[in-house]
Image (cartoon, helix red, strand yellow):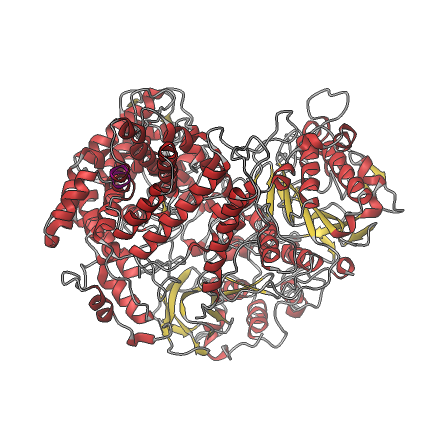
Amino acid sequence: MTAESPSSNSSREHSTVIFDLDVIPVLTKAGCNAASCHGAAAGRGGFRLSLFGGDPAFDFDSITRQLRGRRVNLSNPEQSLLLRKPLGEMDHEGGVRFEADSADAEVLTRWITHGASRIAGPQLEHIEIVPNSIESETVPADAKLQVQATFSDGTQRDVTSWSVFQSDDVATASVEENGTVFMKRRGRCHLVVSYLSKLAVIPVSVPFEGGPAANLETANLETGDTSWGEGNWVDRPINATLKQLGIVPSPRARSTALLRRVSIGLTGKLPTPESVAAFVAAKPELRYEHLVDELMDSPQFNTYWAFHLSRLLRVRAPIKEPQVTRALHQWLESQVADDASWSQMVREMVAANGDTHTNGPAVLHRLTGDARSEAEYVSEVFMGVRLRCANCHNHPLDTWTQDDYHGLAAVFARVRRGRNISTLPSGEVSHPATGAAAIPKIPGNRYLSADDDPRTDLADWFHEDPDQMLAKAFVNRVWRLMMGRGLVEPVDDLRASNPATHPALLQALTLFFIENDYRLRPLLRAMVMSNAYQRGGANDSNRFDVRFNSHFLETTLDPAVLLDATTYVTGVRETFEGEPDIEHAVALPNPSAPSPALDLLGRCPVDENCEEGIGGASLELPRVLHLINGDLLNERIAAPTGHLHQMIRDETSPSEIIKQMYLLACSRYPSEAERAYWEEQLGQVDEQDIVPLLEDFVWGLLNSREFRTNH
Amino acid sequence: MKSPAKQSCRHDVFHRRNFLRLGALSAFGVSMWTKQHLTAAPTRIGPRRDGEEPGPQVNAAAKKCILVWLDGGPSHIDTFDPKPNAPIEVRGPFASIATSETGITVTELLPQFAKRMQHWAIIRSMTSPLGEHNLGTNYLMTGYRPTPAIEYPCVGSVVSHLRGLDASQPARDLPGHIAIPRFRVGGSNFSGNGFLPSREQPFDVGGDPAKPDFRVRDLDPHPRVSVDRLNRRKEFMDRIDDFSRQLDRRPDSALDSPYDDAYRLLSSSDARSAFDLAAEPESVRQRYGSKTIGQSCLLARRLIQRGVPFVTVNSRGWDTHDNAYTRLKEGYTGAQVPVGLVPSLDMALSGLVDDLADSGLLDETLIIVMGEFGRTPKLNTSGGRDHWPRVFSVALAGAGIAGGQIIGASDRTGESPADSPVTPGDLASTVYTLLGFDPQHELITSDGRPIRLSRDGKPIESIIG
């Protein structure tokens, strides 16, 4: 390893080595405190360090006091194990970590020579990376990053040599340990730079071929649609990124395709033949906007978004009391109908007590079994972060500490679980590091008094959170539901080192949501009115892009929506065990209620924890075999009570049946070419084969991409 | 970006459809399935993706692979790496026994395996930093440490993909990677195909082969639908797709329609009969033991015999945090004949090795036995062992590997590798090499990014020979 002569400034102005600021970064950079080495919960070879130096006091103790102090030899620093092991002078499973003449060795030697003490030093305030973004017109290309740290005493220094660099996509750009960046192919990726507990993310962009010259105006001209301008505020950051990367967006989607897309997106239902006719006949200027209004006012909107919310809340616990999921569902549906504030809803749920057979919000506390799992649940579902790792260790790069984890668990320690939720006078979870009861804490924020019910404080805090995690996590999930991919993926893993595809957009959506009192409808309206949402599918020039919204992503319909659409087209209703009155899968109070049909269509298994909602169900071979040979479609298509056979009995002409079926399944009229094709097919068969032919046509429709995807 | 392959792919799709149509109309006057199922002329396996090549084929002995996946992480000490001289809390409740190879011992629960040690190579110095099921499974299955930026495909799906691109391979009607009973590994929804097309997702057989009524769901035709109509339905669906593609001027991206795969499978009665375990003589079925893992291995043998390049037998229940004695040995408390996890594995593996050796298939088939990690050297207070990725064991047989060898070693208490540590990347490299693929060969993701089969792994010298 070649260190970039850090000696002049690594020693700060004074030559004293400060353990927390100078020694820890050496151990981090050399990989000593990584999870695979001494940073493991059990340490390695009897030597344990805190993960990535998250706990300097622990590390100091481990290095200077454990093993009877043999790790440092004050009288003969070169004989210290802390040096001999990483230099390879002694048998070391981790091998040679640095050379004797390296700056790393020099810092450690000097620290031991000066007495191996832990004197107080200034705190690290922040780090700055130069440059803070990298762009290149060509590949291959290289660049160099420099890391400047600022400390609480006002001093600054270059800590490049002690910083850790990582690329989230080494095929696009890789980064050496001295901060040299190699750009290898066109596209965008991010470099994560960390020094001690601070972290920065540097975007790297290399425009695609055709370069920045390819622009949005050209794309808009192609459509001939004059109402198709630069879009709304949602589009600004997207357009900027597309322009920067030289990706040409697709023109606006066909009007009836858009009708279908937005009807599914907002209500989970296909448009009726009547609304297709009305939409086609309406004046183009405002019909889309009017349609959006109409859909948002419909009762189906409330049902569908209550369905999304209950899945977001992971209402999948096998609760044997159906009253429980019904109470929650009813409450969710009425909240959506009132366009209630998400933050208010969360507040109510987190603080709720009472009978879970009647009080919907209290059901939240029955979705998990104990305080620790409720803490993990709350962090993932409401804050979009994975606090789980912090159960066992501090994780400075992800901000979360063991105190945060067990503190949040302590918030729920006094919840009395069972049919009636109440607050117990006492209750605790123990902190594994101290063995004592953990103090209730808002993660990353402040400790709470144990006198009042800390749940109320937590609920209030979501509103004041400077990082706006509640809003950010929610808008990201809604974006995923509407657009097919979250701005941050996975959606429960928001952290500084996992940047959004359009960071400015995520920020803008979050602020907009908060300004509009955390209400769903304004948020959805902003999304569906954007050009990004209204674009057509991929074309040859942008099909490689799945992240930047240059076209609308085609996704498989959600299993529940697909089942309902199949019901709708065939006219044969589905029955759900234990829910005799419910006809639609999206209206089930318990999204994991038993349903072989939903399982066949790819619903996430009840005992698995998949983040559901969209595109999850790819069309796997077993599913296709069932669509071909199984009952799901075959029985419905042939049912005497179904639409097809009813129309046949009513002596509707075959051509009219075909038209009606196109309207039902594809939300459009068959084209000239399609009509001609079907006439030709009809003309080729005998009278008695007309019915089987129509059945086969309906099967073809129900298996077509146009039907089974949202596009 | 290059796209010359597109035209030919499209042509391919029409071609295949014609085969089905012709097959139904000319070869069969009878239109009901009652006679014999659909037939179709053999077709080339799936179309190629733009510019993709199967990669340089080393002339390797192994053509096929059976992965016996011990889901949950088997204890290395209680299987392939016993520690008879360690203190009782490490040694555990089981003794060790000699094998057919002098100097090599295994747990007493593997007596049949021990007699066939000459076929097996045991790696005792596997090491990984990932002690969580999902992450560990990902790493072991793909050879890559998991990252949020890209989903890597498992080795089985890569092998299936590359074999499918290889024009010198005989045409195949069965899926290229089949999982028995199903590919639910690592406790989470790990798709298996990663960035490869979804057709490379392992095909789940679904049912339990040990059950008397075992059959693969939906392979048999619906009573109402004849051969002619089945073909017509596919024709109609394809036409509808063509029309709507024209309407929205979408590029032809239906390169890997799962319907093509399904129709190919349904068209071949020979392929479908591969799943018919009842066709095996009772004596053969008994060789493998009556448990799920045994009958799954037997089914795996039938599938590779019919040209399936990769089969994953997924054995669940190895996450033995408590009652290791009952779970690993007895099966249920007080069992007269032990039917726990390890004795059942013992039967399955010995049946498989004997059967493959007898039929001359062993040299061209690689068998891998592994899980996502090992288990703690010390027994816990519940009489079980917890997750331990730092050192664990993997067993390999067939594929011309020199048997009767031990690779690497763990230390005295089975805590760390003592010698020649092997990473999951090294293992993946070894497997690719044995199956005739250069680990440096690059796969292309859908956004055109080249990814090597294995980035950091080095094949194990004494295994690849």
Looking at the rendered image, the quarter that the C terminus of chain B falls into is bottom right
Report the front residue among A236 and A544. A544
Left or right position of B425 against B30: right
Q: Compared with residue B262, is residue A26 higher up or lower down, i.e. above or below?
A: below
Left or right position of B300 against A140: right
- Residue B202: which quarter of the image? top right
- Residue A440: which quarter of the image? top left
- Residue A71: which quarter of the image? bottom right
Report the front residue among B429 and A423. B429
Which region shows up in magenta?
A656-661
Percent position of residue A538, x then y: 34, 59
Q: Main secondary structure of the magenta part?
A: helix
Report the front residue among A417 and A107. A417
| Residue A38 in view of the camera | no
Q: Compared with residue A457, is residue B62 higher up or lower down, i.e. above or below?
A: below
Left or right position of B208 against B218: right
| Residue A504 in view of the camera | yes
Percent position of residue A253, x then y: 25, 56
- The residue at 74%/39% (across/down) is B79
- The residue at 54%/53% (across/down) is B153
Left or right position of B323 against A703: right
Magenta span contains residue A396: no
For the view shown, which residue lies furthest in the right direction?
B102
